[in-house]
Amino acid sequence: MSEFTYGHLLWFGDPPVPPEPSPYLLGWNPALAKFKPHGLPVKKLARCSRASAQFVHETKQMMERVPAGVATALKSFGVAVIPVGDIFDCVEWLSFAGPRGHAGKESWQRIAGLCMFDGHLLLLGSHRINERGYYAPVQDAQATFNHELGHCLDAALKYISQSREFLECVAADVEKIEGSDLSYYRYLLQGLPAGPSEIFAECFAFTQGAHCLQLRTRSLSEYFPSCCRFVKELVDRLSSTTNH
């Protein structure tokens, strides 16, 4: 009887224990069809990735560098990471609209990471279509990982990006953005709930040393000082709680 393995599907903490195969069914395990911890189709995810062994190793290293308090929150919530060759390894659909904050459904091929299944799955691609139209390795995988992990953390904390406290930070920062910056940073300035969600994720990525958005003149903490401070203090509190 062959045992179920998670393949390239990685977990914060110990992976959920799959159901045992039935001896009298000669290794066939019908219970696996219904085994979807945290709503994830793990049987499918376990065999869909074309990621190289090197990229899987690099993804594991990224996970190991996540602050202990954040990792504990993700473990409690139930978060898995799937390194893939590109997002189409595991995403077989193309919506009629493009990714949130992007123009047109053709934008999907330029996406290197996704937060899926209500924050329980982080999908990280090693390749995508770059700005020149070529299929190429992702140059900022750590930044993509950090940003999507911010979305996972947001979900794990019951969407703290939509809390009154964070929305007040967003309002205070956005009020000071003007001129051409309003257009340039439109991805972060979307309406509720998308805008605050993206700001939270990008501020989290900023606190981890690598974020996705290409800035014009100032750092993210200068454009969004209140939001960055909120997220940094949150990460510090999580770490403090873990240490004690």
Image (spheres, rainbow, N blue to C red):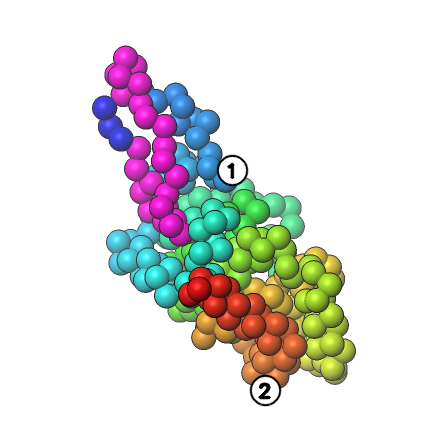
Q: Is residue 217 above or below residue 39?
A: below
Q: For residue 20: magenta?
A: yes
Q: Which residue is nearer to you in this view: 224 or 169?
A: 169
Residue extent of the magenta highlight? 4-27
Residue matched to label 2 = 217
Residue 227 position, x and y percent, is: 63, 73
Give the overall secondary structure of the magenta segment. loop
* Label 1 SS: helix
Q: Is residue 191 above or below residue 210?
A: above
Residue 44 position, x and y percent, is: 41, 36
Q: Is residue 101 above or below residue 7?
A: below
Residue 186 position, x and y percent, is: 68, 70
The N terminus sits in image quarter: top left
Q: In the image, what residue type sits under mark 2?
A: Thr
Residue drawn at point x = 40 percent, y = 52 percent = 12
Residue matched to label 1 = 39
Residue drawn at point x = 63 percent, y = 55 percent = 159
Q: Which residue is nearer to you in this view: 233 or 6?
A: 233
Residue drawn at point x = 44 percent, y = 44 percent = 90
